[in-house]
Image: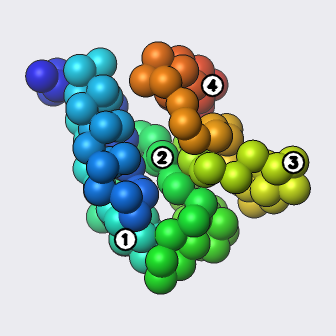
Amino acid sequence: MAKADSKLVLIVDDEARMRRFMRMNLELEGYRVVEGSNGLEAIDRVREDLPDLVLLDVMMPEVDGFEALHIIRETSNVPIIMLTVRDDEEDKVKGLELGADDYVTKPFSPRELSSRIKAVIRRT
């Protein structure tokens, strides 16, 4: 159960199963969670909900994660961790150069994701 002063995490992934997996684990850690299923929803939710951190999938319909990241960075410095099944160096570099704070390759363990979230929040 989330505490009143807990951080709000926005999960954006087009796979409902992946969102449920991350939501369940983050809520167990005490985070509050909101969700989106594509890049357009990511942009809207950042503006409306003002999350403390965004978990943003790269490959999504409507607007992909890279484009959503670019648009979000025009108005917000919210910490963003990119999530993707693609692990080639070029994608990682692109995400980081567009302003991502970290880049996590799927599959990942709940423990690794939690540690990365804590590290990014600590730095911001």
Rounded to the nearest angstrom, the CA distance separating label 1 from label 2 is: 13 Å
* First in sequence: mark 3 vs mark 2: 2
Residue 70 screen position, x and y as percent:
66, 68
**Can residue 93 be spotted in the picture?**
no
* First in sequence: mark 1 vs mark 2: 1
Q: Nearer the viewer, residue 12 or 18?
A: 18
Residue at position x 47%, y 82% in the image: 62
Q: Which residue has dot 4 on it?
A: 123
For residue 39, side relative to residue 81 (left or right): left
Cβ–Cβ under 8 Å for marks 4 and 2: no
Residue at position x 54%, y 30% in the image: 108
Q: Nearer the viewer, residue 58 or 72?
A: 58
As displayed, is residue 63 above or below residue 84?
below
- Viewport quadrant of the C terminus: top right
Name the kind of residue labelled 3 in the image.
Answer: Glu
Mark 3 vs mark 1: give the one in front: 3
Q: Which residue has dot 2 on it?
A: 55
Residue 120 screen position, x and y as percent:
59, 29
Residue at position x 49%, y 24% in the image: 109
Residue 78 screen position, x and y as percent:
52, 48
Rounded to the nearest angstrom, the CA distance separating label 1 from label 4 is: 26 Å
Q: Which residue has dot 1 on it?
A: 41
Q: Secondary structure at mark 1?
A: helix
Number of numbered discs overlaid on the protein picture? 4
* First in sequence: mark 3 vs mark 4: 3
Q: Secondary structure at mark 3?
A: helix
Mark 1 vs mark 4: give the one in front: 1
* First in sequence: mark 1 vs mark 4: 1
Rounded to the nearest angstrom, the CA distance separating label 4 from label 2 is: 16 Å
Rounded to the nearest angstrom, the CA distance separating label 3 from label 1 is: 27 Å
